[in-house]
């Protein structure tokens, strides 16, 4: 009944859903689309981690004392050069996927942090065109300092309060 994974052509692809797993001591949660099986999607993601968590011989993410530390300068450098060639864009997107899978960046705005300039215009990282939010204040501050210290305009870091989505408001 179910569709076969288009990569391995062996396993059932199964439902599109979030999957959680451990790799190299980190807990990752990624979205598995409906066309691939869990095994193939995990494998794809683990390759991403292998490749982009040692870019320029630096570690994007390290884990110590029960906390994740992000090398935001590595991320910001990659982000500023991502338009130069497609490989830089892959690195930037790969690093963003890793930070999302670790729960450092998220598409959920409520309760999370944003770097914002007058307008207001969000200065947060993006996954393609989608704005992402920082789940920890310290990460938003480190990112803002590294990326926007020399900006001519003003900016600030804000925590977003209650968020009521359009579909919730319109459902009644
Ligand atoms: Zn597969």
Image (spheres, rainbow, N blue to C red):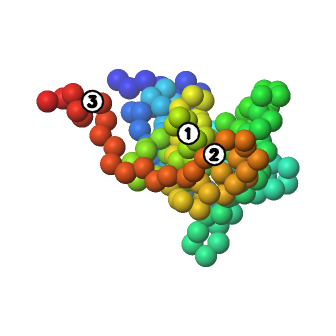
Q: Is residue 103 above or below residue 96?
A: below
Kindly report the distance in space between the C-alpha atoms of the residues bearing marks 3 and 1. 28 Å
Q: Earlier in the sequence, mark 1 or mark 2?
A: 1
Label 3 C-beta lies within 8 Å of the nearest ligand 1 atom:
no
Kindly report the distance in space between the C-alpha atoms of the residues bearing marks 3 and 2. 33 Å
Q: x, y (%) of residue 153?
A: 67, 41
Q: Are marks 1 and 2 in contact (CB under 8 Å)?
A: yes
Q: Quadrant of the N terminus?
A: top left
Q: Earlier in the sequence, mark 3 or mark 2?
A: 2
Is label 3 in a helix, a strand or a loop? helix
Numbered tag placed on residue 167 in the rendering: 3
The residue that appears at 38% across and 26% down in the rendered structure is 2
Q: x, y (%) of residue 137?
A: 54, 60
Q: Nearer the viewer, residue 99 or 116?
A: 116
Q: Nearer the viewer, mark 3 or mark 2?
A: 2
Q: Quadrant of the C terminus?
A: top left
Q: Is residue 127 above or below residue 52?
A: above
Numbered tag placed on residue 118 in the rendering: 1
Left or right placement of residue 9 versus residue 75 in this view: left
Is label 1 in a helix, a strand or a loop? loop
Is label 2 in a helix, a strand or a loop? loop
Q: Nearer the viewer, residue 82 or 39?
A: 82
Q: x, y (%) of residue 113?
A: 50, 52
Q: x, y (%) of residue 121?
A: 55, 35
Label 2 C-beta lies within 8 Å of the nearest ligand 1 atom:
no
Kindly report the distance in space between the C-alpha atoms of the residues bearing marks 1 and 2. 7 Å
């Amino acid at each position: 009944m179910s569709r076969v994974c288009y990569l391995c052509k062996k396993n059932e692809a199964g439902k599109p859903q979030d999957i959680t797993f451990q790799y190299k001591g980190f807990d990752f949660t990624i979205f598995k689309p409906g066309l691939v099986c869990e095994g193939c999607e995990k494998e794809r993601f683990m390759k991403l981690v292998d490749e982009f968590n040692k870019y320029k011989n630096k570690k994007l993410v390290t884990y110590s004392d029960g906390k994740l530390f992000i090398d935001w300068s590595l991320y910001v450098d990659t982000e500023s050069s991502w338009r130069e060639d497609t490989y830089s864009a892959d690195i930037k997107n790969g690093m963003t996927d890793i930070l999302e899978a670790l729960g450092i960046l998220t598409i959920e705005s409520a309760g999370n942090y944003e770097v914002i300039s007058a307008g207001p215009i969000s200065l947060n990282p993006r996954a393609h065109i989608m704005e992402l939010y920082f789940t920890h204040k310290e990460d938003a501050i480190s990112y803002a300092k590294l990326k926007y210290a020399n900006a001519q305009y003003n900016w600030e870091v804000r925590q977003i309060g209650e968020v009521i989505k359009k579909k919730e408001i319109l459902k009644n």
